[in-house]
Every structure is written in structure tokens, then in C-alpha cells.
Image: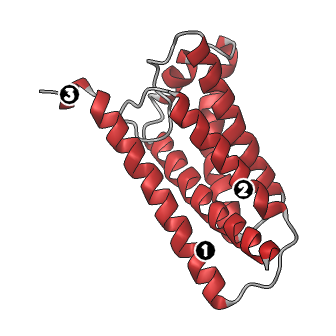
Amino acid sequence: MAVQALALFGLTASIAVGLLFLAAGIAQWRHRALLPGVIANYRLLPAALIGPASGALPLAEVATGAALLIGLHPLSVLAAMTLLLLFAGAMAINILRGRGHIDCGCGHGALRHPIGWPLVARNIALAALLSLRLLPVPLFTAMDVATAVAGGIAIALLCLLFQSLAALAVSPAHRR
């Protein structure tokens, strides 16, 4: 019973992260002119790699998100965990450098969301939850799958909501 519940949490996380990666990848592609600057602001890549990284990142996120949603695992789960932990590491390095003001690049091009420890923790937590998807997959009932889909959508929407609210709170255009 416990393995079934953990596997269901893993499926829920897989759906949530899949939706988050799709949303981020599509938003980054739509605002692709801004992405090289966002990546450059992290000051982690040589200048020669910023262009290729800004072209590959949205595609990698969309591909990983789609693979998670259609259930291709364990490779999609490992890819998603790797991306989440790379993003968390890049943010942590910059926070420790005193550069917490830079945009996280999490998606929406019109909103600037500064990096912070809550984003680092969110990415680590999502990667940890995704690791549950690597457990042996039991047979899920239709109700299990429906619950995981509803939970995944709810988690993704809450993440996007809090990300947008945090960005609006620091946006000079929205201060009075």
C-alpha cells in the first residue's frame, strides 16, 4: 500500500513538472530574444555557449515536459531531475555570490522573478518528488490516474501562481 501511494505521488509530480517544463519552455521560446541575457546574467557559461544554450534550453524543457506527460520514463524523469537540480545549483551559486537580484528565467518573459532560496528549495523538492517515479510502477486504477492528473495540474498551477505573484511583488512597473 505504501509503495502504491509513493508511486502515485511520483506520477503526480511527473505531471506537475511536465506541465511546468512545457509552460516554461513555451514562454522562453516566445520571448527567446530575452533568454540569452538571462543566461548570461548567471555568469556560469562562457560567452560562446550562451547562444547555443539559449536555443537548446526551451527545446529541452518542452521535450522533457512532453516526455513526462506521456509517461516516457525513466529517462524523462532523470532528465527532468537533472534540469531541476542544475537550475537549483545555478541559482544557489549566484545567491551565494550576492547576485540574488538576477531574473530566474523560469518562464514568463514579461515578468522578472529574482532568484532566491525558495526557488532553490522548490526545484530540489520537485526533483525529490520526481525520484518517486523511479520506483517500480504498480497498476494504477482509473481513479488513481485521475487523482494524479488533478493533483499534478493543481501543483503546476500553484507553482505558476506563486511565481507570478513573487514577480509582481518586486516589479517596479507594479509598485505605486
Q: Secondary structure at mark 3?
A: helix
Q: Which residue is mark 1?
A: 148
Q: Which mark is residue 130?
A: 2
Q: Which residue is mark 3?
A: 173
Amino acid on which disc 2 is placed: Leu
- Check the image and report above or below for 117 versus 93: below
Is there any visible trace of residue 110 in the rendered image?
Answer: no
Q: Residue at x 44, y 43 (%)?
A: 30
Point out residue 22 in the picture as x, y percentages from the top left corner.
55, 54
Amino acid on which disc 3 is placed: Ala
Point out residue 47 in the picture as x, y percentages from the top left corner.
64, 12
Q: Earlier in the sequence, mark 3 or mark 1?
A: 1
Which numbered disc, 3 or 1, marks the residue closer to the eye? 1
> Disc 2, disc 3: CB below 8 Å?
no
- Check the image and report above or below for 88 versus 26: above
Q: Quadrant of the C terminus?
A: top left
Q: Residue at x 43, y 37 (%)?
A: 31
Q: Quadrant of residue 166?
A: top left
* Mark 2 surroundings: few (<14), some (14-19) or many (≥20) residues within 10 A: many
How far is mark 2 from mark 3, CA to CA?
Answer: 36 Å
Q: Secondary structure at mark 1?
A: helix
* Mark 1 surroundings: few (<14), some (14-19) or many (≥20) residues within 10 A: many
Q: Earlier in the sequence, mark 2 or mark 1?
A: 2
Q: Residue at x 51, y 74 (%)?
A: 150
Q: Residue at x 38, y 51 (%)?
A: 161
How far is mark 3 from mark 1, CA to CA?
Answer: 38 Å
> Disc 3, disc 1: CB below 8 Å?
no
Point out residue 136 in the picture as x, y percentages from the top left corner.
88, 71
4 or 73, which is in the foreground?
A: 4
